[in-house]
Image (cartoon, grey):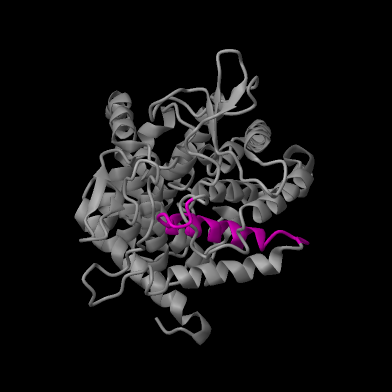
């Protein structure tokens, strides 16, 4: 593709490398979901059902399909998205990460097939550990079996499209069928998550599907879940706003001199107590909070200002920008702020990029220009040779290295992480004008 703006050549190159890696990953993982890849050889550790990261793999495939305009790429994305259906009924607030990011891009690129750049609109806890993943898999085995029948039509449509079979309808009909199938998943997910909203607690509990106590509130239980709840109509928007503000009540520091407290548990006496891990200074948790606030600020219509308490959200964004040094700290932060010499986390940086690009779009915001400048600076660093592998090296090209899955447990502390790849690709696509961040 010829780039008309030489100033964005670095972003074009990085996005091409990432999407090349997506194609290679798809061949490597088959019908499983990638989780993290080894920095020694590029091999992925995978999960059978995707765990809390499955939506990012579906989202990456969708971004690549929008980039290429290929019906076969779109079909693969649709088939992978359909395999997320068992999570609709799972008891976990990470359904936002799974089912929002796994479906949000599906109705974009109606002009798909016209080539690169055709689409112009698009709008984890630290490691849970292998035991939690095993528990999650066991919990939903029966659900996965029953859900396979309901997603068969979608997967069949995807297969026909990818193989070039007409299926009696042709490309426009296949496209509409894919959009309808994935949109139906998102609607069912929104309704199910809304049913799990606890009006007494004022939030959707963290849940038990990934192991541990159910009545918890965590920073990574907010992003994705807020727009997913809001998709359930007026009642859903009220629940989404309550869920977000309840987490801000718990997590936000009182002053910019302190860091957010990312994880809380409801005790037997009915009060909330901070959990020891992840501790304050977990930079990915801070990025998740900033992203959730940015989501609300960029998607709120004038008629919803009272519901969303926009003034409070604006103040929360300002506090997070200061207390977490998003605009002044390292471009790629340490995984734990209190361990500056410990492992860094490129995935936290990539999430931050998308949050900053969203905040740059908030009308009248004093921080808009500085957020935009900072976001591009972080993107340039992530896309540099320091973190993104290049062709002719010892590793596959397009790996975003130096992501930290679980700093406390020491799991995958310098690895490629699937959600890091996703947010880097999303940020680059937004910078290039390929996606509209108000819609995802």
Viewer-side residue, 114 vs 224: 224
Image location of residue 132, percent across then percent down: 33, 31
Image location of residue 180, percent across then percent down: 45, 45
Q: What residue is drawn where x is 52% and y is 67%?
A: 378
Q: What residue is drawn where x is 38% and y is 66%?
A: 69
Q: Residue furthest top?
A: 269
- Taking the image as shown, residue 365 lies to the left or right of residue 160, namely right
The image quarter containing residue 261 is: top right
Q: Using the image, determine if residue 103 lies above or below residue 370.
A: above
Whether residue 76 is visible to the viewer of this picture, yes or no, is yes
Whether residue 167 is visible to the viewer of this picture, yes or no, is no
- Taking the image as shown, residue 311 lies to the left or right of residue 205, namely right
Image location of residue 266, percent across then percent down: 56, 21
- The reply to whether the magenta stretch includes residue 61 is no
Viewer-side residue, 173 vs 224: 224
- Taking the image as shown, residue 48 lies to the left or right of residue 1, namely left
Image location of residue 314, percent across then percent down: 74, 50
| Quadrant of the snapshot with the N terminus | bottom left
Viewer-side residue, 238 vs 216: 216
Total numbered circles: 0
Report the span colored magenta: 339-365
- The reply to whether the magenta stretch includes residue 361 is yes
């Amino acid at each position: 593709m010829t780039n008309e703006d030489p100033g964005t050549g670095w972003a074009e190159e990085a996005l091409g490398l990432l999407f090349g890696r997506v194609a290679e990953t798809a061949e490597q993982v088959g019908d499983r979901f990638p989780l993290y890849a080894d920095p020694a050889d590029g091999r992925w550790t995978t999960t059978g059902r995707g765990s809390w990261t499955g939506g990012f793999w579906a989202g990456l495939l969708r971004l690549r399909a929008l980039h290429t305009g290929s019906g076969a790429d779109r079909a693969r994305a649709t088939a992978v998205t359909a395999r997320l259906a068992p999570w609709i009924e799972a008891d976990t607030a990470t359904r936002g990460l799974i089912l929002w990011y796994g479906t949000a891009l599906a109705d974009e690129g109606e002009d798909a097939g016209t080539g690169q750049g055709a689409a112009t609109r698009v709008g984890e806890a630290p490691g849970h550990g292998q035991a939690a993943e095993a528990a999650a898999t066991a919990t939903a085995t029966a659900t996965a079996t029953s859900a396979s029948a309901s997603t068969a039509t979608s997967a069949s449509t995807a297969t026909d499209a990818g193989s070039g079979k007409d299926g009696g309808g042709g490309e426009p009909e296949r496209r509409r069928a894919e959009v309808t199938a994935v949109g139906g998943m998102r609607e069912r997910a929104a309704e199910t998550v809304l049913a799990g909203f606890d009006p007494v607690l004022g939030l959707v509990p963290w849940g038990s599907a990934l192991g541990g106590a159910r009545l918890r509130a965590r920073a990574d239980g907010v992003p994705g879940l807020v727009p997913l709840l809001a998709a359930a109509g007026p009642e859903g928007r009220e629940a989404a706003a309550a869920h977000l503000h309840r987490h801000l009540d718990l997590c936000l520091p009182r002053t910019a001199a302190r860091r957010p407290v990312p994880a809380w548990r409801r005790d037997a006496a009915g009060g909330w107590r901070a959990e020891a891990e992840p501790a304050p200074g977990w930079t990915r948790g801070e990025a998740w909070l900033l992203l959730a606030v940015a989501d609300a600020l960029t998607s709120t219509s004038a008629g919803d200002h009272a519901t969303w308490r926009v003034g409070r959200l604006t103040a929360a964004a300002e506090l997070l920008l200061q207390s977490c040094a998003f605009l002044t700290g390292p471009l790629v932060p340490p995984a734990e702020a209190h361990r500056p010499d410990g492992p860094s986390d490129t995935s936290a940086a990539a999430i931050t990029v998308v949050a900053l690009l969203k905040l740059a779009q908030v009308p009248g915001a004093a921080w808009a220009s500085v957020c935009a400048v900072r976001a591009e600076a972080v993107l340039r660093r992530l896309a540099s040779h320091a973190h993104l592998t290049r062709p002719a090296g010892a590793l596959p090209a397009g790996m975003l290295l130096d992501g930290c899955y679980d700093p406390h447990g020491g799991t995958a502390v310098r690895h490629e992480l699937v959600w890091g790849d996703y947010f880097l690709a999303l940020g680059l696509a937004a910078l290039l004008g390929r996606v509209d961040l108000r819609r995802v």
